[in-house]
Image (tube, grey):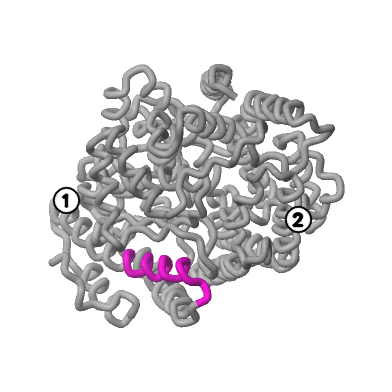
Amino acid sequence: MSEDFSSIDASDWSQLEPIYQNFINQEIKSAQELESWLIELGLFDAYVSETGSMLYVNMTCDTENEEIKQAYLDFVENVQPELAKIGDILNRKFAENEFADQLNQEEYHVLLRDTRMDLKLFREENIALGTELTKLGQRYNEICGSMMVEFDGEERTMQQMGKFLQVNDRDIRENAYNTIGTRRFQDADEIDDIYEKMIALRHQVAQNAGYENFRDYIFDAKHRFDYSPTDCDDFHKAVEAICVPLMRDVDEERKETLGLESLRMWDLGHDVHGREPLRPFIEVEEMVAGTSRMFHRLSPELGAFFDTLRDGTSLDLDSRKGKAPGGYQLQRDHSRKPFIFMNATGLQRDLETMVHEAGHAFHSIYADELPLVDYRSAPLEFCEVASMSMELLTHPFLDEFYSEIDANRAIREHLEGIVSILAWIATIDAFQHWVYTNPNHSREDRQAKWLELGERFGTILDWTGFEDWRKVGWQKQLHLFSYPFYYIEYGIAQLGALQMWLQYRENPEMALANYANAMKLGGSRPLPALFEAGGMEFNLGGSTVQGLIDAVREELSHLPA
């Protein structure tokens, strides 16, 4: 089959169905023919996938455009359900084929394992439930995308408000925090309603597939063969015992330096010594150009990869009204070109996001020559190693944006942020474990659990007067709505990225070679093998966490304040 599918409208199921039917009807007489069939099917799947992906991209870039939104919803409602049905038939044709076990088992082990699990889980009645969940996620995006406030004489997005939480004037920070919180809280009840509908639908999905709860179902659906809920609990305990004390030490030092009796929510984002907030760039193109220079200095290969994104179609980086929140990298499977989406407003976190999403793009580029399209995507736990490693490995090149003093500030903020984000990851993951193993909980139960987790993993902040806002603090986490249980991956990957950082400090050439070797494998090997290919240990427990956090603590002790 030719890779030129341009005459086919992949948003029209009537044009897709006969092509997929040909794949179903095709006779397979050997393992070699089965392999060729898989590769050809993957090429067509890539074209269809890219069509759906770009409809999603268009929608997130402009959530207020009704025509674009309807095109995306039409695909979700009319094409995705049919793809799910026919995908199950095709999966069976592959996994139950008499020649499947004659394929090279090193190369096909992961695909066969994953496909057979998908077959075990597939229930046609869950397709409609999946469509409803997608629509609810779209509604959540609409709500968040429409959140605007009047501040300092201008209408601003939530992302644009972030810079006011970094200024030195405490009154402005407090006012900004109040403005943001007041606006968010206006939609709290509707967001709670959406989440409760999602919980009920996901519980039904799990029960339809024969599972007691959605937590146990999603571990299998996400192909988590290499770690379990018990391992996640070990991670939670390690973070509580090792990361949280360091995070609270940092908070106590901040409180004392600022001379405050208590640390408030608007006291975390600014410089404790009264210096102006880090402003790495003003215009988005400045960020792109500087990032390119950083990557060229880190690795000529990575620099060249990054420059391929500067083609006018692969980046949408500015923040604007109607644009969905967050950031992501998406691989266009057919054209084999990454796309990066973010909401840049000139902050240091924007630069970190740019570098992070570029790491995902590098992963996609390294893996895009793998013949099986399924293998061009790795497990999420390893995808995030690709991106988080880049955040750390670019530390020595921050002088493209900053003086030495400000570069050290940025590094300190980043390392302190890693410690606090590990605590947040544990919070979100533990929250989801509880939510979905207790699906009949009340809204009040959920709020109480969130507060309990805040005491376990949270900072030393004084929430007096803002108790109601604190109870719904989880609502800002997009993953809870559109990507359930996609969050522990960040924690696992951060442990990998910190190991890559330590490698780079010892031997930069070896670390970059390990990075490339691991990323080139895509998703063709089990998770522990991917870590091993990069010279990293796959372990979620206290022994790994302790050594890495000790290294972070040591580095922080040497960085100027």
Magenta span contains residue 63: yes
Percent coordinates x, y for residue 237 in the rendering: 65, 29
- Please tell me in which quadrant of the rendered image residue 151 appears: bottom right
Q: How far from the left and from the top, in percent, is residue 17? A: 29, 77
Pinpoint residue 284: horizontal percent, then vertical percent: 42, 54
Residue 152 relative to residue 307: left or right: right
Q: Amino acid at mark 2?
A: Asn
Q: Is residue 351 above or below residue 413?
A: below
Q: Amino acid at mark 1?
A: Ala
- Label 1 sits on a secondary structure element that is helix
Is residue 13 or residue 512 the one in the foreground? 512
Q: Which mark is residue 178?
A: 2
Taking depth in this image into account, of 450 and 208 the one nearest to the observer is 450
- Taking the image as drawn, is residue 476 in sight? yes
Furthest toward the right, the residue is: 465
Q: Which residue is mark 1?
A: 31
Q: Residue at 65%, 25% (x, y): give it.
A: 246
Q: Quadrant of residue 109?
A: top left
Span shown in magenta: 49-64
134 lies above or below 539: below
Residue 129 visible in image: no
Pointer 1 local density, CA inside 10 Å: few below 14, some 14–19, many at least 20: some
Determine the CA span between mark 2 and mark 1.
64 Å
Q: Tell me which residue sits at (25%, 51%) in the image.
A: 308
Q: For this view, does 98 lie left or right of residue 417?
A: left
Badge 2 density bin: few <14, some 14–19, many ≥20, Cα 10 Å: some
